[in-house]
Image (spheres, rainbow, N blue to C red):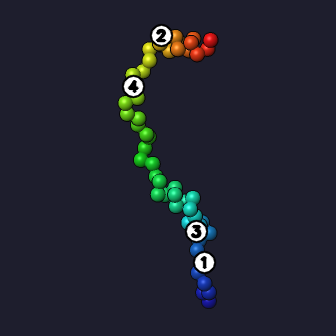
């Protein structure tokens, strides 16, 4: 006495939100190139004093 088969309760129809998540998978952290040298502590202190005037 099998009528119509129903999908399992955890199966949800694909929505645009889930489709975009599956197609735009990230491949890890973004690594910026050529971002310059890190500033020294003295340079950072001078800059913060200038900005906080």
Q: Nearer the viewer, mark 1 or mark 3?
A: 3
| Secondary structure of residue under mark 2 | helix
* Separation of residues labelled 4 and 2 (CA atoms): 17 Å
Q: Position of residue 8 (x, y in %)?
A: 59, 71
* Separation of residues labelled 4 and 3 (CA atoms): 47 Å
* Separation of residues labelled 4 and 1 (CA atoms): 59 Å
Point 47% across, 10% down: residue? 42
Point 60% across, 77% down: residue? 6
- Disc ID at residue 42: 2
- Residue where numbered disc 1 is placed: 6
| Secondary structure of residue under mark 3 | loop
- Residue where numbered disc 3 is placed: 13
**Residue 9 or 33: which is nearer the viewer?**
33
Furthest-bottom residue in view? 1
Marks 1 & 2, CB-CB < 8 Å contact: no
- Among numbered discs 4 and 2, the one appearing first in the sequence: 4
- Among numbered discs 1 and 2, the one appearing first in the sequence: 1
Up-down relation of residue 36 to residue 7 (above or below): above
Up-down relation of residue 25 to residue 29 (above or below): below
Q: Residues within 10 Å of mark 3 (few under 14, many from 20)?
A: few
Point 46% across, 52% down: residue? 25
């Amino acid at each position: 006495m099998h009528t119509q088969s129903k999908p399992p309760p955890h199966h949800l129809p694909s929505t645009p939100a889930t489709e975009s998540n599956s197609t735009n998978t990230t491949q890890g952290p973004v690594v910026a190139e050529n971002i310059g040298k890190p500033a020294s502590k003295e340079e950072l202190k001078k800059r913060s004093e200038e900005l906080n005037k």
